[in-house]
Amino acid sequence: MSSTMPNNNMIVMGDVSGGGPAQMDLAELLATRLLVQGNSGSGKSHLLRRLLEQSARMVQQAIIDPEGDFVSLAEKFGHLVIDGAACSEMALHAAGERMRRHRASVVLNLEGLDADQQMKWAAAFLGGMFEAPREYWYPVLVVVDEAQLFAPAAAGEVSDEARRASLGAMTNLMCRGRKRGLAGIIATQRLAKLAKNVAAEASNFLMGRTFLDIDMARAADLLGMERRQAEAFRDLPRGTFVALGPAMCRRPVPVRVGAVETESRSAGPMLTPFEPPSAPVHELILAPVPVSETLARPRKAPVTPQPDLLSQLAAHGEAQAAVLQEEQPEESSEDQAEREARMNAILRDILADDETSFRAAAVLYQDFLVRCRIAGLGRNALDLKAFNRALATARSGVSEDMVASDDWQQAEALANALPEDLQSVFLFLARAAISRQACPSDAEIARVYGTASQGRARRLLEWLEDRNIIVLRADGMGRRVMTVIGPGWETLPGVPQG
């Protein structure tokens, strides 16, 4: 491990195989990042806890905790525990920036949230830390447990939006975080499931017990070991890791992690003596159910076969549609225009809420349908596809007069070729260009997209420019000008950070 000469930056992780303390240079770690790998039960979380405890009074810490394992650090070391289930995406983005401003150590507890929301919430928090003003770029250890959840190597069951946001935040942390004082420490059960561009940015490694050939091969490659030596990872005891990196040692060395002061809430079950029940097992398990606990169900008389359920539902739906068609007179064009105006008014009321920008379109759709029913517009005022288009148009800020213009019809035709989540951003930019207004700022674009991250807004602009949809340029004063390729609509100069 690192030199044993006195150094105030050194922390002790445990013992080196063969004797002596296993030291880690904290200052070097802040500059070079760390990757921890180990199967479930290898002692990975114990290692992270040891590292956090040893460095808690030396450097600010931020922990992305998907299982609530590290909340116990609060009692011993004063970490602020943020309950992700009680926060909005916007609040977490603000919290990420404020923790850097006030130099507070934080545990973001994402326990109980589904995978999609965990990814979005972690991305918002990391985005706030990443976008903090330069004067607050103090060193921070950013620990992400179960990193394969937040930087997956392949698409899974989560939404594309959540995966893009989370993977982008993790990539920023590992690739660009060093200059901002952010030192990423990521831990994963499966190297093969972790995005390669995220894992490749670490210069320090602690590799624990693993059994799958693909993970052993990747671990051996990262440590510079020969493939035939990879089998050794199967034989590592729990709590022992092979260390390598400038913050620890120049050659792979087995390290046994030392004891910790705090306890995990999710420790596995302890083996206790097994005592069989004293009474006969069949009397306990197969005893007759008391009559009072059974439900009296009358015996049904035989019935003639009925059509299958899908056929019944289809027939019922057709009958209901016929009844509604008979009961409701055909709407005139004036009635239809009034109906659309009322729905647009309802949509504007929904968007007037500050929190609306950070709610999913599906949630807004349900709110819209409820309000339409209250207003007497029926249960199915708009289908989801039509609502998404109306939502994109409303978020663009277009006026009623412009909606009827040929330019706006052309803008909507161009938006149809884009992914659904980007249509509102494009229409927002197109509206500014058609109206010859100043180019929107990153903050305005981010809000239209439904995020508080200005970095994500810049990536959206890059995506649109890469696909030859818009062109961005700077004028002589450094202000941004945006032009829509094809129609040639162009905004006035605007300040990106305005």
Image (tube, rainbow, N blue to C red):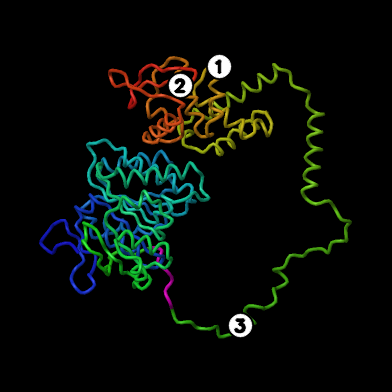
Q: Residue 289 in the image: x percent, y percent?
A: 69, 73
- Residue sitting nearer the eye, 216 or 204: 216
Characterize the local packing of mark 1: few (<14), some (14-19) or many (20 or more) Cα atoms within 10 angstroms.
few
Residue 19 relative to residue 456: left or right: left
Q: Quadrant of residue 38?
A: bottom left
Q: Quadrant of residue 285?
A: bottom right
Query: Which corner quadrant holds the C terminus?
Result: top left
Report the disc number at residue 484: 2
Give the amino acid type for the residue marked by disc 2 in the picture.
Val
Give the amino acid type for the residue marked by disc 3 in the picture.
Val
Q: Which residues are magenta?
A: 265-271
- Residue sitting nearer the eye, 100 or 446: 446
Give the amino acid type for the residue marked by disc 1 in the picture.
Glu
Instruction: Identify which residue is drawn at 25% across, 65% down.
Output: 252
Look at discs 2 and 3 and give the one toward the viewer. 2
Between discs 2 and 1, the one toward the N terminus? 1
Q: Quadrant of residue 164?
A: top left
- Residue sitting nearer the eye, 347 or 162: 162
Q: CA distance from mark 2 to mark 1?
A: 22 Å
